[in-house]
C-alpha cells in the first residue's frame, strides 16, 4: 500500500468517528504537525495539558474561546472553532454543553434537585411545562423541540451499561405544581416506576429536615472509569462544570450530608406515590 493510500485509509476511518472523537483526533494531528507537545500547546493557549489530553481523547470539548486560541496557535484559520460550533452538543444551552458530554460518559450520576425534577428524569409533558415557564414569548413548536431534546437524555437509562443513577429531591420538587395536577401525577408515577424497576435510586428530603447542605443549589456529581470525578452546579440560565479535585470532594461531602438528611428509599417511594395520588384526586 502506498503512503497516499495509507493516508486515504486514515481519512476514511476518521469519517466514521463520533463528532467529538473526530474533533479530538484532528486536534492531535494538527498539534503534532505543528511539532508541539500537549504541554507546549497548553502553555500557549493557557490550558492545562491534562485538559488538552481530554480534548484529544474526545472525553471533553473545549469552550469556544479555547478553540479560538488553539486555532491561533496552530494557524488553522478558525477550523477548530467552526468544528466546535457544529457538534451535536450545540442542541443544548451553552452552559450545559460540557455537562451533557460528561453525562453521556459517566458511570455514576448523583443529583440533588431543589425545586424541579432533574432534566434526565423529566417526562415530556413536564419538560414542556418547564420550558414554557422559562420563555417570555413561548413558541409552541420550539417548546416541543426542546422538550423532546431533553427527554432524549433519558435514553442513558435504557443502555445495557446504564450508569448508577442516584437522585435526591427536595420535597419542594414534589409539591411544586409544574404543568398542572395531571402532569405532576404522571411525572411522579414515572419516578416511582423507575424506582420499582431498579433503574434509579431516589430519596426525598422532607420539609421537616429543615436546613441541609445543598438547600440552595442544584448539584450533580459524575464518576467515570478513566477520568477524575466532576461536578456540575446549575442556576438560572447558568451552570458551572467543576473538575478541581478539592472542590469536587467538598461537593461530594455536601451531597453525602444531604443524603443523610433524606428519607430512606421505602419512605421516599411511599411519599412519592402518596403525593401522586393527591394530584390524581385533583384531576
Image: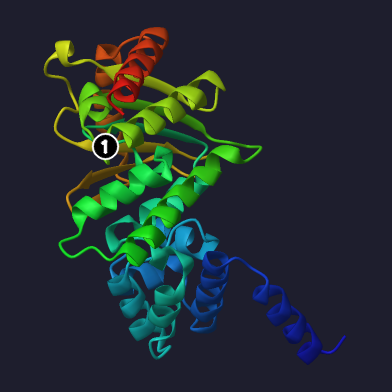
Q: Nearer the viewer, residue 27 or 188?
A: 188
Q: Residue at x 54, y 43 (%)?
A: 156
Q: Nearer the viewer, residue 219 or 5?
A: 219
Secondary structure of the residue carrying tag 1 is loop
The quadrant of the picture occupied by the C terminus is top left
Count of numbered circles in the view? 1
Residue 64 position in % (x across, y down): 31, 72
Query: Does residue 42 appear anywhere in the picture?
Result: yes
Q: Nearer the viewer, residue 79 or 219?
A: 219
* 247 sits left or right of 99 in the view: left
Q: Is residue 30 above or below residue 188?
A: below
Q: Which residue is mark 1?
A: 180
Q: Is residue 214 above or below residue 13?
A: above
Label 1 neighbourhood size at 10 Å, few (<14), some (14-19), many (20+)? some
Q: Is residue 93 above or below residue 13?
A: above
Residue 19 position in % (x across, y down): 55, 69
* 32 sits left or right of 120 in the view: right
Q: Residue at x 54, y 83 (%)?
A: 33
Residue 255 position in % (x across, y down): 28, 25
* 12 sits left or right of 226 in the view: right
* 35 sits left or right of 98 in the view: right
Q: Residue at x 27, y 33 (%)?
A: 113
Query: Does residue 226 appear anywhere in the picture?
Result: no
Q: Residue at x 33, y 50 (%)?
A: 128
The scheme the figure's colours follow is: rainbow
Residue 50 position in % (x across, y down): 42, 56
Q: Is residue 191 above or below residue 8?
A: above
The quadrant of the picture occupied by the N terminus is bottom right
Amino acid at each position: 500500500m502506498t503512503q497516499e493510500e495509507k493516508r486515504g485509509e486514515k481519512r476514511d476511518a476518521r469519517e466514521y468517528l463520533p463528532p467529538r472523537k473526530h474533533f479530538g483526533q484532528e486536534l492531535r494531528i494538527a498539534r503534532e504537525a505543528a511539532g508541539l507537545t500537549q504541554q507546549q500547546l497548553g502553555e500557549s493557549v493557557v490550558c492545562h495539558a491534562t485538559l488538552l489530553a481530554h480534548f484529544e481523547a474526545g472525553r471533553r470539548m473545549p469552550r469556544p474561546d479555547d478553540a479560538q486560541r488553539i486555532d491561533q496557535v496552530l494557524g488553522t484559520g478558525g477550523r477548530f472553532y467552526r468544528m466546535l460550533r457544529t457538534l451535536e452538543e450545540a442542541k443544548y444551552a451553552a452552559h450545559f454543553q460540557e455537562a451533557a458530554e460528561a453525562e453521556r460518559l459517566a458511570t455514576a450520576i448523583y443529583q440533588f434537585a431543589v425545586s424541579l425534577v432533574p432534566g434526565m428524569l423529566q417526562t415530556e409533558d413536564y419538560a414542556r411545562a418547564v420550558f414554557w415557564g422559562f420563555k417570555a414569548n413561548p413558541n409552541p413548536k420550539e417548546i416541543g423541540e426542546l422538550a423532546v431534546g431533553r427527554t432524549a437524555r433519558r435514553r442513558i437509562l435504557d443502555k445495557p451499561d446504564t450508569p448508577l443513577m442516584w437522585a435526591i429531591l427536595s420535597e419542594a420538587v414534589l409539591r411544586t405544581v409544574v404543568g398542572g395536577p395531571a402532569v405532576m401525577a404522571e411525572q411522579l408515577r414515572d419516578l416511582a416506576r423507575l424506582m420499582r424497576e431498579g433503574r434509579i435510586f431516589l430519596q426525598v428530603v422532607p420539609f421537616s429536615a429543615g436546613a441541609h447542605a445543598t438547600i440552595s443549589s442544584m448539584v450533580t456529581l459524575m464518576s467515570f472509569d478513566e477520568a477524575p470525578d466532576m461536578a456540575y452546579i446549575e442556576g438560572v440560565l447558568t451552570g458551572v462544570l467543576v473538575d478541581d479535585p478539592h472542590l469536587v470532594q467538598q461537593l461530594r461531602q455536601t451531597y453525602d450530608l444531604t443524603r443523610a438528611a433524606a428519607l430512606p428509599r421505602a419512605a421516599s417511594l411511599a411519599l412519592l406515590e402518596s403525593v401522586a395520588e393527591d394530584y390524581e384526586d385533583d384531576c
